[in-house]
Image (cartoon, helix red, strand yellow):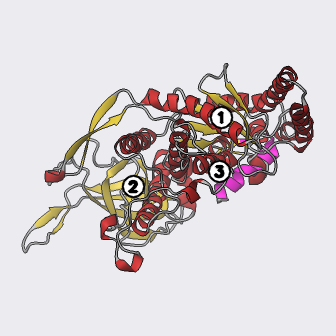
Amino acid sequence: MSVLSTVAALTASRTGRAEPLTTVRHQHLDEKPFVLVPLTLAGEACAPLAALAGTDPEHPTLLTVRQPRNRAERFRFAERLAALLLAHIDGCLTETEPYTVGRGKEKEERLRFQRAPQLLVPNGEGIAYVRLLGRLTRLRATEGPYAVDPSVPALGKWLTWYAELAEFPNSGVLLAMTRLLSAHWATGQSPSEDSHLASLLAWIDLPEGSDGAQAAREAEDPAVWPPAGPSTDPVFDRTLHELMTRYDEASDERGREAVGRQIDRELHGQMLPTWQLMWRSVELLRALPEGAHVPGRWTLDRRWFSEYAEYLDADGRPQARRDQAVRAARRLARLEDAVARYEAERAYDDPLVMAEYELTGEAFTGTVTARDEDRFIPGDRPGSQVWRPTITLRTDARVGLAVGTEVKSPARPGQGARILDVRQEDDGDHTVVLQLKGGFANKRKPPAPAGTLAEIGEELTYTTLNLTAMPSALPDEENTPWTHGGPPQPYEPTDEDAEETWE
C-alpha cells in the first residue's frame, strides 16, 4: 500500500466510513454494461453451476446447470451464455466512425465501432473464471463425435479476448467490481477483506450514523449476503448436494422437473444479492466525475474491439494456447507501456493521485513567483538563438528532483520543462527555476500567446511522469530470429488442445 492509501485506510478505521482515494473516476462505465455473476461447482475446475447475466438491472437472465458433472449440460450452459453475450456484442457492431493511423505517407484511414461491449464481474476470481471458460470453449470442434454448437467456440474466442485485455490497466472492457471500488475508496479492513463485494460496499455505501466495521461484519453473513462467486458457500453446497441427489434419483420426468425448478430457485437466491450489489456499485461509480483521459482510453478499447471483430471475420482462428516468441515480447512491451501510461494519466487527471508522487519525490507543487519571457539561449547552429522562457516557482515542500531533470505540468501537458536550478531559501522554502519549451502555439519569439505562459501567483504541479512513453520496437512475426524458433507456423487447434479439460 502507498503512504496516502495507508493513511486513508487508518482514517477509515477510525471514523468507520470509507475514505475517497480519488477525486474522479478512472475507468469508463458503459451506459449498458453486460453484468455476469457466475457460480461454479465446488471442487471442479470451472464446472459451470449457474449465472445471472444481462444488461437490465431489473430483469437478469438465470442460467443453471442442474447436473454440472454432465458434459452435455455444461455445453448447453455455454450455448445459453453465448446467446446472451454474443447478442450484446453484435449490438455494438453497428455504427462506425473513421479515424487515422500513421503519419505522412504512411497515414491510413480506418473505421472503428462507436461502442464496445463492456463486461462486469463481481471480483478478481470472476476474471479468472472468464479466462478459464474461454480456454475451455474456444478450441471446441463444431463437427465430429463431440461437436458443439458453433456459438460455443465463438463465445470462447470473445471470452479469451476479454481476459487478455483485463491484464492491461488502461482497458475497461472487462472489470472486476471489487478492484474498481477499492481503487476509488479505502476502507478500514484488509485488502483480502476488500475482495468480498458485500463487505467492501458496506464501508462505501453506508447510511449516516452507521459504522463501517459493524456493517461489514453483518455483510459477511452468508445467510444474508451469499458469496459473490464463483465459489459457493459450503453450507449451501450441502443443500445443493441434497437437491441434485434427489434430481438424479427422481423416478419420472415430472419429478425431475419439480426438483430442477427448486434447484433453480435456490441458485437464483444465491446470486440475486450479488446482482443487486453490482448495479448499486455501478450507480456509486457513475456519481463520480470521469477523468479527463478516460474517454481516450475507451476510444482505444473501441479500436481493439473493432480490430478483433475484423480479425474474426477475416480469419476466425482461435487464440493459441501459448504465444509465439515475438508475439509474447510484443505483448509484454505493450503491457509495460500501458502500465506507465495509465499511472501517468491517473496522476495528471487527479490531484489525490499526484500527491502520491509528490511524497515519493517524483513531483512538486509550487507558486509562480517570477518569469522571464524574453529569454533566448544559443541554438545548435553557430550564431543562432532559440526562445526559451523561464518561470520560477516557490514551494514549502522539499524538492527531490535534480538540476537537468525533464518535467511536465498537468495544466500544460504539451509544454516541456527542464529544471535549471533548485535552491533552499533561508525560511526553509525551495525555489525552482524551469526552462520551458513548446506549448506556445508554434510561436518562436515573445510575446507568448495568452494562457501559454504561467502567470505570477499561479499554482502549478510539475512531475517526471510522461504521458508519451512508447513501447520498444520489435520485429514482425515473420522476422522472428532463429534463436527464438524462427517464423511461427499458423496456429491450428488440435484435438488434444480441445480435449484438455471438460471431458
Q: Position of residue 85 (x, y in %)?
A: 55, 32
**Nearest-to-viewer mark from 3 and 2:** 3
Hey, what amino acid is under mark 2?
Leu
For label 3, the residue is 128
For label 2, the residue is 467
**Earlier-in-chain disc, 1 versus 2:** 1
**Left or right of 276 in this view: 423:** left
**Left or right of 44 in this view: 437:** left
The disc label shown at residue 76, or none = 1
Q: Tell me whether circle 3 and circle 1 mark residues in contact (CB < 8 Å).
A: no
Q: Residue at x 51, y 28 (%)?
A: 87
**Earlier-in-chain disc, 3 versus 1:** 1
Query: Magenta region: which residues?
Result: 3-18
Hey, what amino acid is under mark 3?
Ala
Q: Residue at x 71, y 54 (%)?
A: 7
Q: How far apart are the alpha carbons under marks 1 and 2?
A: 46 Å
